[in-house]
Image (cartoon, coloured by chain):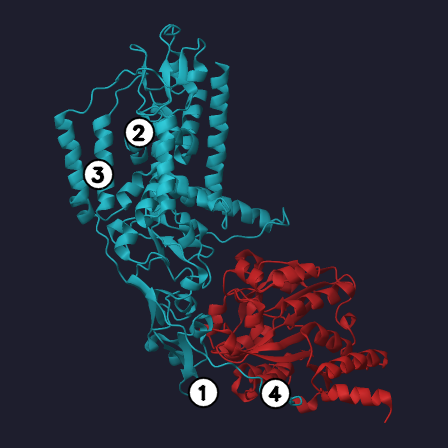
Chain colours: A red, B cyan
Amino acid sequence: MERRTFLKNTAAAGIAGGIALNLSGVALEEKKKAPVKKGGYDLVAVKGGEPEEMFERGIAALGGMKTFVKPGQTVVVKPNIGWARTPEAAANTNPGLVKRIVEHCIKAGAKTVYVLDHTCNAWKDCYEKSGISEAAQAGGAKVVCGNHRQDYREVDVPEGKRLKKTSIHSVIMDCDVFINVPILKNHGGAVMTCAMKNLMGIVWDRGYFHRNDLQQCIADCITARKPDLNIVDAYRVMKKGGPRGRSLADVAQMKYQLLSTDIVAVDTAASKILGISSDRIGHLRLGEELKLGTMNLDKLKVERITI
Amino acid sequence: MRKYKILKIVRLICSLLILLLFISVFLLPKNVFAAAAGIQTVPAFVRSTAFLTAGTIGVFALLVLLTLVLGRVYCSFFCPLGTVQDIAVRLARLFRLPRGKKLFTRNRRLLRYSVLALLLCSMVFGTAILAGLFEPFATFGRFTAAAIKPSFNRLNNLLVDNAVFASLYPVENKPFSLPLLLTGSSALIAVFAAAAFCGRIFCNTLCPAGAVLGLLGMRSWFKISFNHDKCVKCGQCAKACKSNCIDLKNLLVDHERCVNCFNCTAACSYGALNYIHPSKTGNIQPDLSRRDFLFVGGSALLGATLVPRILRGVPSPKGIMPPGALDFASFTSKCTACQLCVSNCPGRVLKPAALQYGLSGFLQPRLDFNSGMCEFECIACSNICPNGALTPLTVEKKKRLQIGRAEYFRQRCVVVIDRTHCGACAEHCPTGAVQMADWEEGLTIPIVRPELCIGCGACEFICPARPEKAIIVSGLKKQGKAKVGKYKQAENHLQGKDFPF
């Protein structure tokens, strides 16, 4: 066995301890030199690294951010900023990940990158406590309020079954590229919240969803503005007590990240990380019926990266 | 005299800055000056009786001491309602409005002391709202909250919507309250109009702070006094006086009503009025007669017995007190309904009560879960209350403070009626008191664990059921302590395993 292959293998096996850490560092250097296969994947799954690092590897596998963002375009990055809780509580998307995504968008030539969410708690508290406001601004994004009625615009949802009309934030309706950055969580009402459920944060009247078949409305709403890319933060995962969470005990460190243009596929893969059957999550099946994507991961070209 | 002109200008600048500061305390949340509300006379007094600590008593003692040394400077320098009246006087003189014929009016001691006795006793015996309706800071607060704040917010949002300043962000207006608008604006209009025609008449007849400070002010060390040798009785001083308290005939100043605005000393061209420690002072008004004393005593009795009975506080499930109120009786006897907490609530949940607390609780803050929910880690209201009607809380304490209790009504729940998923209530519950449990057809319905519920109303606010919500929080007469749920640490079930797909 060559020295180089040996090092790679040891790193991949993930032997613990200082030597292994050192070796994996070497291996990383080696890998950077190796040619990276770009594009062509339907779903990229990364595990074992920090959120920023996993994103770097994941987006590279999709051909880089320039595949999605062209110079001069307006981009919306929509994380989950629903709750006035700290990053450790895993109720909101990881701020470091949001920052790195924003940086990539700007490097790809984006004119403006907006970051927003229609929060559940008081929006200023959510933006501050989650660390996302600060991180996104440091990355060069324009952080805007998602709790202002006047910023929402009524749109038709012609493909919707229960949701025929809804009000969506104008910034999202007007943008060129829409990047959905949910955090994976258990959800008391919708069973799981991930990429599809995260888009309830772009509408004004969520009560309507709850009154008119939540699962169907979640799926319907996405037909109004399908995200161009979904990046699932599953670094820290709220496995119970979601979506708000009650204590840090609800959170397990899983160190996963998923990237895909297929919102149903990315959620199906996420449900397996959360450890629940995708059949239990009504909006996945309904999303498939609305041709938003597929629940059959076997049909897809999946890239799996372990750091 | 030049030095007195400077003193007057200092008073002008100081009072205007303090007025702006107090307006800002109502307009801008998380204001660094918010604690300044504690220096207002009535709040400082009520707070000292609420907490009985060296700090709270010290603040009130300092106000007393200040008045005993310098006279009623509070009324001219620090009282925002005083400054509002000065603006009215200024405008009236600018537009040459007619004013009362007499430049020196009678000291209406009997009226003043009777009002004071009534208000003070009604407060001591259980209801603060009557005192609150006459108290200058609360009067100013209600007007600011009812009229200035909504206009300010609307202007702010107009600028935001038209992208005038990039750094501005939209703010939500507080829920509209007709009782607040009517009470707040009518009281201010009345005081403003009275001031335009009769100067500081409110301060010297109805204001409880003015009555107390007047009693101290007439005994102050420094006083504005006449130099008989220099005075030519030109009357410029009496014309400039806002309190109508200069007796030109006898060359005396009624120090009980003098608010130390230094208008007279600045107006005098002969140096005949000085701010000094006088060697002897003439008594300007006869003391109260025995009959008067009986009258004041009578109104005190009325305040102690009948008023608290008529303006009775009635705790009800709809009257949910802000966190830190702790006990209904103590809350309703200390809150003067200044609206500072309502204005500083980051959400829309705090609202002036109509009659949810009974008459005594008129305009006192209550939580309305139709318009908002109490943020889990927010302690804004309890920590800003200048009266001590709300006890300051730490975030840790607040997170366990039970202000109400949720109850689930299954027959109204959308899961049960429509057979669809919901779970909005459990989704928003911060303590785990509302959790979804398996029901029929793979659906889940909430169960409430009352011992964990703090009554924040997140569940009720978000509940989509209409017309009646399916989960309702009721207020408590006494705020209690909730238990904290114990939860097992979640595990990474994929540890050391390959991708699960």
Residue B329 horizontal side relative to residue B415, left or right: left
Q: Is residue B211 above or below residue B365?
A: above
Q: Which residue is mark 3?
A: B118
- Residue B216's label in the rendered image is 2
- The image shows a total of numbered marks equal to 4
Q: Give the CA distance from mark 1 to mark 2.
A: 74 Å
Chain identity of mark 4: B
Residue B174: where, in percent of width, then height? Answer: 44, 52
Mark closer to the observer (2, 3) = 2
Residue B330: where, in percent of width, then height? Answer: 28, 53
Q: Give the CA distance from mark 4 to mark 2.
A: 76 Å
Q: Earlier in the sequence, mark 1 or mark 3?
A: 3
- Find out whether the residues at labels 1 and 2 contact each other: C-beta distance under 8 Å: no
Q: Amino acid at mark 2?
A: Leu
Q: Amino acid at mark 3?
A: Leu
Q: Which residue is mark 1?
A: B442
Residue A29 horizontal side relative to residue A53, left or right: right
Q: Quadrant of residue B371?
A: bottom left
Residue B342: where, in percent of width, then height? Answer: 41, 51
Q: Give the CA distance from mark 2 to mark 3.
A: 19 Å
Q: Earlier in the sequence, mark 2 or mark 3?
A: 3
Q: Residues within 10 Å of mark 4 (few under 14, many from 20)?
A: some
